[in-house]
Amino acid sequence: MPRHVLESAAGAVADIGLRIAVEAFAWSAINSVPTTSALLARANASNAGHLLDVWHFYNTGSTTRIDHRPRRRNRRRCATQRRPPRARLLPGGGDLDVRGFVTAVKSIGYDGPFSIESSYPEFRELDIAEAAALAFDATMKFF
């Protein structure tokens, strides 16, 4: 995303109090957390910031530990595969270090909201109340 596109989008929504979230996707032009940081640093858009997603964070090669070597995955397949183990399970249901991610984000002073994104067939078929309860219980294990 060119800087002027971000600035234009941020400017268009600033007056109504909205913020723009920029998220790194491994297969996009904004393909890493450092690339996102550089874009945000260059842009004149005070209402724009990072959207950090645990799945995209690790699948762009980011890590919460210096000695951790990121695993290389077929990222497009991981993003679209509909069955575990690569499906987007509830927090803690897969092989990503959710606790390390939450700890790292909080350690740099983040105190805003957290949310989850889960997408696998069995979850989507649940009654909304049951899905919400499962999502809440899975998430709260990390707080």
Image (spheres, helix red, strand yellow):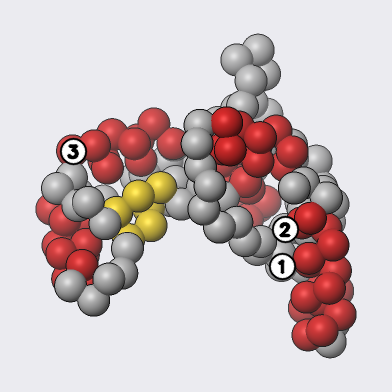
Describe residue 63's horizontal placement relative to residue 97 as left or right: left
The residue carrying pointer 2 sits among few (fewer than 14), some (14 to 19) or many (20 or more) residues within 10 Å by Cα, namely: many
Describe residue 60's horizontal placement relative to residue 95 as left or right: left
Which badge, 1 or 2, is on the more N-terminal residue? 2
Viewer-side label of 2, 3: 3
Distance between mark 2 and mark 3 Cα atoms = 32 Å
Viewer-side label of 1, 3: 3
The residue positioned 34% from the left and 36% from the top of the image is: 37
From the image, tell me which residue sits under label 1. 119
Marks 1 & 2, CB-CB < 8 Å contact = yes
- The answer to whether residue 22 of the structure is visible from this angle is yes
The residue carrying pointer 1 sits among few (fewer than 14), some (14 to 19) or many (20 or more) residues within 10 Å by Cα, namely: some
Q: Quadrant of residue 115?
A: bottom right
Q: Amino acid at mark 1?
A: Ser
In percent of width and height, residue 61 lies at: 56, 31
Distance between mark 1 and mark 2 Cα atoms = 5 Å
> Foreground residue, 120 or 97?
97
The residue positioned 85% from the left and 69% from the top of the image is: 134
Mark number displayed over residue 88: 2
Describe residue 21's horizontal placement relative to residue 87 as left or right: left
Distance between mark 1 and mark 3 Cα atoms = 34 Å
Mark number displayed over residue 42: 3
The residue positioned 13% from the left and 53% from the top of the image is: 4
In percent of width and height, residue 79 lies at: 63, 56
> Foreground residue, 2 or 39?
39
Q: Amino acid at mark 2?
A: Arg
In percent of width and height, residue 122 lies at: 86, 74
* Tag 3 secondary structure: helix
Residue farthest to the top? 67
